[in-house]
Each structure stands twice: as C-alpha cells, then as structure tokens.
Image: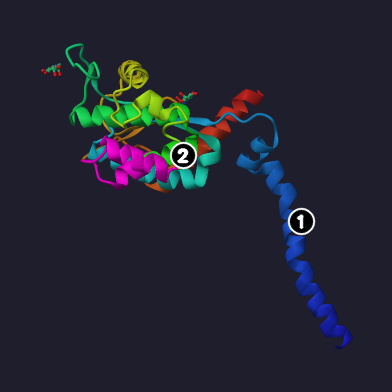
Amino acid sequence: MTRSTMFYSLGLFLLPTLAVSTQQPFALKHGPVTSAVATNIDIKVPVKLGVMSACPDALVCEAVFDKVLEQVREIVDINLTYIAKLNSSEPDFGVTCMHGTNECAGNVQQLCTAKYADPIAWWRFVQCQNFEGRYRVGLPEVALNCASAAGIDWEGGGSGECAGVDGGGKGAEGVLLLQKNVEATEKLGVRKSCTVLINGRPVCVHDSEWKDCEAGHTVADFVQQIRKEYVLLNRDENA
Ligand SMILES: *[C@@H]1O[C@H](CO)[C@@H](O)[C@H](O)[C@H]1NC(C)=O
Ligand SMILES: *[C@@H]1O[C@H](CO)[C@@H](O)[C@H](O)[C@H]1NC(C)=O
C-alpha cells in the first residue's frame, strides 16, 4: 500500500464519520421532534378517530392510521371514540349501534382492550378485527383470537373481565364504558364515521369518500399535520 492509497482509504473511512458527527448537534439543536424528546417536555398530540367499529369508513381510517402510526407513534396519543345512540330500550348495551348489536360488542371489546392492554397491543387487536372483515368485527371468537394474536391476556389481564370472558362484549364494565364513550362522542359533536380529530379539531372525514380534508388525507398529510401540531404543543409549553 502506497502512502497516497493509504491516505485515500483513511479519508473514505473518516468522511462518513465526520458527516454524522456534524449532523448530530444540528439535529439536536434544530430538529423539531428530537429536541423536544431530548428534554423532559413531551406532550403527545391527541388524535381521535370517531368511528363505529363495524363501519367500512372506520376500517379505511384505521388502515391509514396504521401507516401514520408507523411514522409518528412516539408523539401521538391515539384513541377511538364511538358513534352510536344512547337508547334505554336496548336490553344489552343501552345503546343502538348503526351496524347492529355486533358492532356494539365490537366497540366494547375495543374499549376494554384500550383500558386494560397496552396501547400497541390494543391497536393490534383493532387491526386484527378489521382484517377479519367488518361483518366479523364484534364476534366473540374473533375477539378471543385477536386478543391472542395481539398478545393480550384476555382472561387474566382485565380485558376479558371488562368485556365478558366469553368474548361476548356484554360485560357490565365494558357496557358502561361504551355508554360513557358514546356520550363523550356526542359532546364532541362527532357524528360521522370516520372523523379524524387532531388535538381536538376535526381535520378530515371519510364518509364513502374523503371529505372536508383541508390539509389532505394521505398518510404523509396526516404525518405532517401531527408533526406540526407536536411542535406547536411543545413550544407553547416552553413559553
Ligand atoms: C385516550 O384514552 C386514555 C385512556 O382512557 C386516556 O388516558 C387518554 O387521555 C386518552 N387520549 C385522548 C387523546 O383522548
Ligand atoms: C331503541 O331500541 C329499541 C329496541 O332495540 C329499538 O326498537 C328502537 O328503534 C331504538 N331507537 C332508536 C332511536 O334507535
């Protein structure tokens, strides 16, 4: 090896290292996401999807948000809020669900796993139900299979006791959760499945097609809106 080739290969080795080390402080100082995570202040962006668990529009939204979460899960606090009608004449749920009682059961199963399983497992559970198709969302065997697929301990972890150990979705606690959730959805003024709310603001609706989506409705559009909101939320906190 001559002196010049040795110098050359040393240069090749050093270049990427230099590039990384000069980028690092810049990202920490100016990167909107990393900078806030690096400090203690980390307010996650509240995202709500107004849905009915067995509604085709809900399945569209939740599929899009599965991809959105792949990119921004760390900075998002996502929940589902259910659209239905409180109805004291309904014997099992006290609520009328547009797609039938199975949908009410599906809502309860999702609310109970949201409460008792970790957020990642809950989201997997919802995606698994959707993968079965909307006519099977809410069925007891689907709930039990999806709990197992998502790594949720149905019987021992609280979800089963809440929603009904048999997977029926009629557990007393779960039914109460559903009624309260439906009431909260009404208070929010959310009436269409699916409505996307970012930090409390409705930003987009999927009702057979995308509607009222001023800032767009692709995965990238939602990711961008969430990142922007995250910066605003955490900057306000600093002020
Ligand atoms: C979502 O639900 C959890 C648990 O019920 C709650 O702690 C959190 O504040 C909710 N987030 C939003 C955005 O509503
Ligand atoms: C309330 O529930 C009863 C019993 O299922 C049903 O017949 C009725 O249509 C429901 N009312 C509304 C407004 O959905």
Work out whether residue 187 or residue 147 is closer to the camera in this orientation and state it. Answer: 147
Asked if disc 2 and disc 1 are in contact, CB closer than 8 Å, the reply is no
- For the N terminus, give its image quadrant: bottom right
Write down the region rendered in magenta: 126-150
Residue 16 appears at what percent x and percent y?
73, 65
Q: Which amino acid does label 1 sit on?
A: Ser
Q: Which residue lies furthest to the right in this view?
A: 3
- Please tell me whether residue 26 is drawn above or below residue 164 in the rendered image: below
Name the element at disc 1: helix
- For the C terminus, give its image quadrant: top right
Q: Residue 178 carries which label?
A: none
Name the element at disc 2: helix
Residue position for label 1: 21
Q: Say which of marks 2 and 1 sits in front.
A: 2
Work out whether residue 49 or residue 170 is closer to the camera in this orientation and state it. Answer: 170
Q: Residue 121 carries which label?
A: 2
Residue 24 left/right relative to 72 = right
Within the image, what quadrant is residue 180 found in?
Answer: top left
Q: Dot 1: few (<14), some (14–19), or many (≥20) neighbours within 10 Å?
A: few
Residue 147 left/right relative to 100 = right
Residue 115 appears at what percent x and percent y?
45, 26
Is residue 4 shown to the viewer in this render? yes
Residue 213 appears at what percent x and percent y?
33, 37
Q: What residue type is labelled 2?
A: Ala
Seen at 55% across and 37% down, the residue is: 75
Within the image, what quadrant is residue 216 found in?
Answer: top left
Q: Dot 2: few (<14), some (14–19), or many (≥20) neighbours within 10 Å?
A: many
Please say whether residue 168 is one of the residues in the magenta stretch. no
Within the image, what quadrant is residue 32 found in?
Answer: top right
- Please tell me whether residue 50 is drawn above or below residue 4 in the rendered image: above
